[in-house]
Structures are given as structure tokens and as C-alpha cells.
Image (cartoon, rainbow, N blue to C red):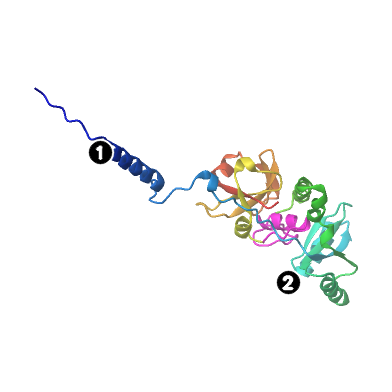
Amino acid sequence: MVFKRIPHPGFDCKLRIFFLYLLFLILAVGCGGRPSVAPSYQPVVQRRGLAPMGYAIQVGAFSKLHNAVRLSEALQRRGLNAYYFVHKTGLYKVRFGNFPSNEIARRNAEDLHDTGVIDEYYIVTPEEYPSAKGRRNGKTYVRDEIVKTAKSFLGLPYQWGGTSPAHGFDCSGLPMVVYNLNGLNLPRSSRAQWEVGTPIDRAQLVRADLVFFATSGGRKVSHVGIYLGEDKFIHAPSRGKRIRIDSLSKEYFRRCYVGARTYL
């Protein structure tokens, strides 16, 4: 006669509970040795944005580029971050400063006027920038204005290390000036621009976002451009070359692309 051992019902229940508990621990701890976080509880990345520009001083109305260049250089020698731009009238104007009040801006302008550095001047108020008008017209308006401003610098020669209009803009000087002209206080260096922006995937790129590259190898940011849409961006490529439009799909830029940032 053969006898079969029949397990006790209580033992079978306890065994099932044990295996269920063990399975729970494995799923909770995961491969990394730390409890996993469900996707629905992932922290949301907040857009940091840029501080608005304050009051600026605008001078000149030149038909000849070299006159705007000469005035910009004279102001730069005084430690002022001056730059020229093409006004909507087609004339070249020079702008500098980021002052906290109209009074302080006017005082600085009067000092320069009294010493003969500038003639007539105009105080640009924060309300006049496209970024301020964008509160009524929407972010698309601001992005369009940034792209329009960037394209106005096409053809300018490149020089590493400065934003002198006599020699051109270096790669990070171009977006800084373009954003400043539109009322957004973008930092000077490409690394700082990378750090203050909100990270976005390449598929999320929109006109006026910045695209970054590691042109010196590795993954360290060393180059930046302004995205124009349709896979195109505008940038100051390298010494001896002029500001131009390129494609992100080019082999070189695909290879050294490290990411993008948005500020709007």
C-alpha cells in the first residue's frame, strides 16, 4: 500500500504569502538597489526662464556700418557691453546697458554725453521689448522676433572671445545679443546659457530655442546656435567664417550635438 502525504492547508497558505512578499520586495527594490518611483510620481521640470532686461541706452542712426562699429568700440573701451544692430528703418543703431531704473540709465547717458562720447540718445524702457509685448501677443510672437533679429546678423564675420561688431560675434555672443535685443537677459557664455535653460528633446525644438554642441570633443558644451525651425539653426561657426545658417542633420553637427534648451 502506498501512502501519500497531504500538505496541511495552513502551510500551503503561508507558503503562498511568503512568495508573494518576496516578489513584492524584488519589484520594490529593483536593479539599482533602491525603491523605484512610479512614473506618475516623477517630479515635473519647471521652466526657469530668463530675467527681463531693464533700461538700456540707444544711440546713433547711421547709414554707414563703420560709423556704428566705431561708436560701439569707443563704448566698449569704457567697459560697456555695446553692440550695433540693424533697426527696422534700415539704419544702424548702437545699444548698451541693463539699468534698474530710467533715472540711472539717464544719468549714465548724460555723463557720456557731457564727455563727448555720444550725442543724442534714447532710453529704451522694459515695456518696449518684444518679450514685454509678448504678454499680449503670445510666445509665438517673441520667438518670431528672436529669429528675425538673429537673421539680421547673417554675414557678419566671426571672432572668438568678444562681441565687438568690428570683428563679429563669437558663438555665444550672438544669442546673447539677440536675446538682449528682445528683452531677455541671456548670460554671456555658452556654458552659462546651457545651465540656465530648460532641457528639451530634439523632437521638442521650436523656433528661438538654443542648440548646443561639443565641438572640442567629449560632451562639454563649446558651441551654440539659435534654432530656426525645419532642422535649421543660425550660428557663428568659427574664426574666419561668417554667421550663417546650417542644418542639424549635417554629419558634423549630428556627431557633436549634445542637446537643446528653451527659455520661453
Q: What residue type is labelled 2?
A: Gly
Q: What stretch is highlighted in magenta?
A: 158-187
Tell me the crowding category of disc 2: few under 14, some 14 to 19, or many 20 or more residues within 10 angstroms, Cα based: few
Q: Which amino acid does label 1 sit on?
A: Phe
The Cα atoms of the two marked residues, 1 and 2, are separated by: 84 Å
Question: Horizontal placement of 48 versus 252: left or right?
Answer: right
- Residue 237 in view of the camera: no
On screen, 150 above or below 229?
A: below
- In this rendering, which labeled residue sits more in front, label 1 or label 2? 1
Q: Does the magenta stretch include residue 196?
A: no
Instruction: Tell me the quarter of the image containing the N terminus.
Output: top left
Question: Horizontal placement of 240 versus 154: left or right?
Answer: left
Question: Horizontal placement of 215 versus 3: left or right?
Answer: right
Instruction: Tell me the element at label 1.
Output: helix
Looking at marks 1 and 2 on the same chain, the residue that comes earlier in the sequence is marked by 1
The residue sitting at the top extreme is 1
Instruction: Tell me the element at label 2.
Output: loop
| Image location of residue 122, percent across then percent down | 88, 65
Camera-nearest residue between 225 and 5: 5
- Residue 235 in view of the camera: yes
Q: Are marks 1 and 2 in contact (CB under 8 Å)?
A: no
Q: Which residue carries the number 1 mark?
A: 11
Which residue is at 30% across, 37% downward? 13
Q: Which residue carries the number 2 mark?
A: 79
